[in-house]
Amino acid sequence: DSLTDPIDFSQQVYDRIKELRITYFPEDYSGKTALPVRLCEKVLKDKFANSFELSLLFASVLEKNNLSPVLLFGEKGRVYSGFSLKKEKKPIVEVFGKNEHNFDDYFLIDGNHLPYGSNLSFDTALFQAKNALKLSDERIILLNISAARAHRILPLPNRILDKGDYIFS
């Protein structure tokens, strides 16, 4: 059973997302105060996403399979997703100052490694994400999705498909 080995399972998720041939689609942030985010269903249907949406897709599959996902956000726009094997209680949000990063207990990938055309193996993607975070001189925000759920911060409300897009009830 793949869920007995979370690292093996996350590799299967990584490989499967790459097989979906989702194209990287960068967002133009100029003049915007908020980033519009496509839901996972829309990403899967349209086959394009930015690195944040790909990270969300990866984290969503991990969460659905009880792997306690996290999302990490760098000041310069990088987004990482993954999980920790440690089951200790963690806060919902942690902010790490410049050069205060230690994510050795986490298995993380950079959302930029998930789109179609990126030929990085899972092991290389893990190594590059960990190395990039170690060398980073920016503040990092870690969002612990499992801790958020434990505090009743739940996923989006009911969605209804309307003319190819989702609306919320």
Image: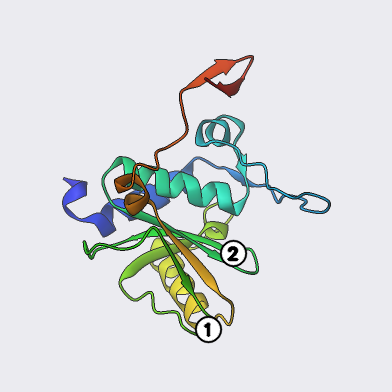
The single residue placed furthest to the right in the displayed view is: 31
- Residue at left 53%, top 48%? 54
Q: Position of residue 167 (x, y in %)?
A: 58, 22
Q: Secondary structure at mark 1?
A: helix
Q: In the picture shown, does residue 86 fall above or below 153?
A: below
At label 1, counting other C-alpha atoms closer than 10 Å, the crowd grade (few under 14, some 14-19, many 20 or more) is: few
Q: Quadrant of residue 136?
A: bottom right
The single residue placed furthest to the top in the displayed view is: 163
Residue under label 2: 78
Amino acid type, mark 1: Leu
Query: CA separation, marks 1 and 2?
Result: 13 Å
- Residue at left 44%, top 74%? 130
Horizontal arrangement in the rendering, residue 89 relative to residue 56 (left or right): left
Where residue 155 is drawn, which disc sits there? none
- Residue at left 21%, top 48%? 2
Frontmost residue, 92 versus 117: 92
Q: Quadrant of residue 127?
A: bottom left
Of the 4 image quadrants, the one containing the N terminus is: top left
Q: Position of residue 134 (x, y in %)?
A: 47, 81
Q: Are marks 1 and 2 in contact (CB under 8 Å)?
A: no
Q: Quadrant of residue 155?
A: top left
Residue under label 1: 135
Horizontal arrangement in the rendering, residue 167 relative to residue 102 (left or right): right
The image's colouring method is rainbow
